[in-house]
């Protein structure tokens, strides 16, 4: 059963069909949840007793950080699927996810800097959490550059998969950096022993924003995968067309260069 389902999901044509049907619903739901989350952020959530209204940056910063790491984790799984199982959609998923993950990581860094100015008195410190997130963004940039450097998709997929697996060691560093080192960055507030430390009036809107931005990320990822599949199909068609043109051009030349029969020789 699972093998049949796996093989069916491995077919790009089947993926294009079900993703095309799901995208309008995902886009509408993510837009609605994002609008609700922004309304809660700016009009319902109370100011923090210490940080005041600057705490509202958290409702974009934290979901962006979660998705920046989440997309890289998804790329790591895709890298394993590409190297071990040769799944035909694994490298497509990797290539589609890299720019989206990089964008969320950049949003995390920018909003974190804006949040850090009133809290720490500066836009940037070489804090362990901030530095490891910057490293993640640079790894994303390196992966995107590697995809563009190698023209052959299969060779590019192998190289990117190896780089992705090497860079995955940064994920636990980002997660546990606030526990391993003394940093300015606040410790975990949601996934922690003893339960979340946030009050429900702030926790539930934050979880809602994480869900909304996650659905937005999934929508963008599916659309990017569809675009990548079509791009590869166009590339394959162009290559076949060029091969046919080359074969047609070489045919008359080969016939002209062939020796004439004895009766036609001058």
Image (cartoon, helix red, strand yellow):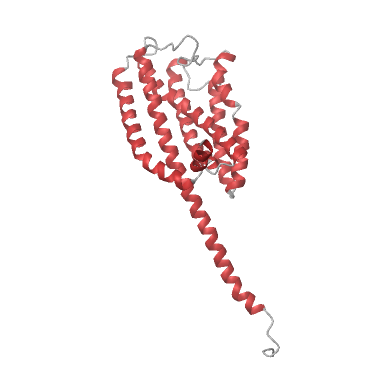
Query: At x 33% / y 21%, what residue is drawn?
Result: 41
Residue 35's place in the image compared with 155, above or below, is above
How far from the left and from the top, in percent, is residue 182?
A: 57, 12
How far from the left and from the top, in percent, is residue 73?
A: 53, 30
Total numbered circles: 0
Residue 164's place in the image compared with 20, above or below, is above
Instruction: Give the side of residue 13 with respect to residue 148, left or right.
Output: left
- Asked whether the viewer can see residue 142, the reply is no
- Residue 257 in which image quadrant: bottom right
Which residue is most to the right? Answer: 262
The C terminus: image quadrant: bottom right
Most foreground residue, 154 or 205: 154
Instruction: Give the side of residue 219 with respect to residue 1, left or right.
Output: left
Most foreground residue, 13 or 264: 13
How far from the left and from the top, in percent, is residue 174?
A: 55, 22
Query: At x 41% / y 45%, what residue is drawn?
Result: 17
Most foreground residue, 234 or 56: 234
Residue 117's place in the image compared with 145, above or below, is above
How far from the left and from the top, in percent, is residue 192?
A: 49, 13
- Residue 172 in which image quadrant: top right
Query: At x 59% / y 14%, what residue is drawn?
Result: 180
- Asked whether the viewer can see residue 115, the reply is yes
């Amino acid at each position: 059963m699972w093998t049949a389902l796996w093989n069916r999901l491995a077919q790009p044509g089947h993926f294009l069909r079900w993703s095309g049907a799901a995208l309008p619903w995902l886009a509408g739901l993510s837009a609605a949840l994002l609008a609700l989350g922004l309304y809660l952020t700016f009009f319902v959530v109370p100011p923090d007793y210490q940080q005041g209204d600057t705490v509202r940056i958290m409702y974009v910063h934290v979901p962006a950080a979660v998705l920046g790491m989440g997309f890289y984790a998804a790329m790591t799984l895709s890298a394993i699927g590409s190297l071990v199982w040769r799944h035909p959609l694994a490298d497509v998923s990797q290539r589609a996810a890299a720019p989206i993950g990089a964008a969320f990581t950049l949003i995390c860094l920018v909003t974190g800097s804006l949040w850090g100015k009133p809290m720490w008195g500066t836009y940037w410190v070489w804090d362990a959490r901030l530095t490891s997130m910057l490293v993640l963004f640079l790894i994303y940039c390196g992966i995107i550059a590697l995809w563009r450097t190698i023209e052959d998709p299969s060779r590019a997929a192998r190289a990117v998969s190896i780089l992705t697996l090497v860079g995955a060691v940064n994920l636990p560093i980002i997660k546990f950096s606030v526990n391993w080192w003394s940093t300015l960055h606040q410790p975990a507030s949601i996934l922690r022993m003893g339960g979340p430390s946030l009050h429900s009036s702030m926790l539930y809107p934050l979880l809602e924003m994480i869900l909304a931005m996650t659905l937005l990320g999934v929508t963008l990822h599916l659309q990017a995968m569809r675009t990548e599949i079509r791009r590869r199909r166009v590339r394959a068609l162009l290559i076949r067309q060029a091969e046919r043109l080359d074969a047609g051009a070489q045919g008359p030349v080969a016939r002209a260069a062939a020796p004439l029969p004895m009766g036609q020789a001058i």
